[in-house]
Image (cartoon, grey):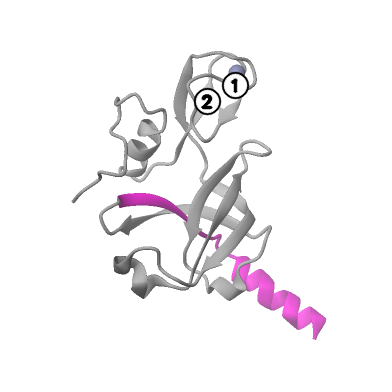
């Protein structure tokens, strides 16, 4: 399995540990040792305080859809069977404005909404290996149908 597009951990790319954790089904986000801010996309130094002592820590994997788009034309031939699919920015609950870009799985693209509660899962992608994806949190569909009942 080729992972040419993913920087290897320790290659000097600040995103290396993010992908290395994903390959082991963990969502880890860079965090500043100086001011405790979560940082994503990964940086060489903290954008808030300038501290260069940055580490990766596990996060809850829970968040909400901040914005998204639906892709109807595959950008690679091997993804032709996957369209349409949704991808977008997920705001993680750890910090306001902490957003991860990922695809949204486990929901019809037409049912996805901004503000929808989601949780991380990991999806095997052709030539990419395991990548973080997000799916609606359990209970979302139930909530939706209850609203329908109330609204008549
Ligand atoms: Zn900082």
Is 71 in the magenta? no
Residue at the spot of label 2 = 31
Crowding at dot 1, Cα within 10 Å, few <14 / some 14-19 / many 20+, comes out as some
Left or right for 32, reference 22: right
Which of the four quarters of the rendered structure image does ligand 1 lie in? top right
| Number of callouts | 2
Quadrant of image for the C terminus: bottom right
Q: Give the magenta-colored segment's residue range.
A: 129-152
Which quadrant of the view contains residue 127? Answer: bottom left
Crowding at dot 2, Cα within 10 Å, few <14 / some 14-19 / many 20+, comes out as many
Q: Is residue 56 above or below residue 130?
A: above
- Residue most toward the bottom? 152
Q: Secondary structure at mark 1?
A: loop
Residue at the spot of label 1 = 36
Residue drawn at the location 62% of the way across and 66% of the way down: 140
Residue drawn at the location 51% of the way across and 37% of the way down: 59
70 and 37: which is toward the camera:
70
127 and 115: which is toward the camera:
127
Residue 36 x %, y %: 59, 21
Q: Is residue 110 above or below residue 47?
A: below
Which quadrant of the view contains residue 114? Answer: bottom right
């Amino acid at each position: 399995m080729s992972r040419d597009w993913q920087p290897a951990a320790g290659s000097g790319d600040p995103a290396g540990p993010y992908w290395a954790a994903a390959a082991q089904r963990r969502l880890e986000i860079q965090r500043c040792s100086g001011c405790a801010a979560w940082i994503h996309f990964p940086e060489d130094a903290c954008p808030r305080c300038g501290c260069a002592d940055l580490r990766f820590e596990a996060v809850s994997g829970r968040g909400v859809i901040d914005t998204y788009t639906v892709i109807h034309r595959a950008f690679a031939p091997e993804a032709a069977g996957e369209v349409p699919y949704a991808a977008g920015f997920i705001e993680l609950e750890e910090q306001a404005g902490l957003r991860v870009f990922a695809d949204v799985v486990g929901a019809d693209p037409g049912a996805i909404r901004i503000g929808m509660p989601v949780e991380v899962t990991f999806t095997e992608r052709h030539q990419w290996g395991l990548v973080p994806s997000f799916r609606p949190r359990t209970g979302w569909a139930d909530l939706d149908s209850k609203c329908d009942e109330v609204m008549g």
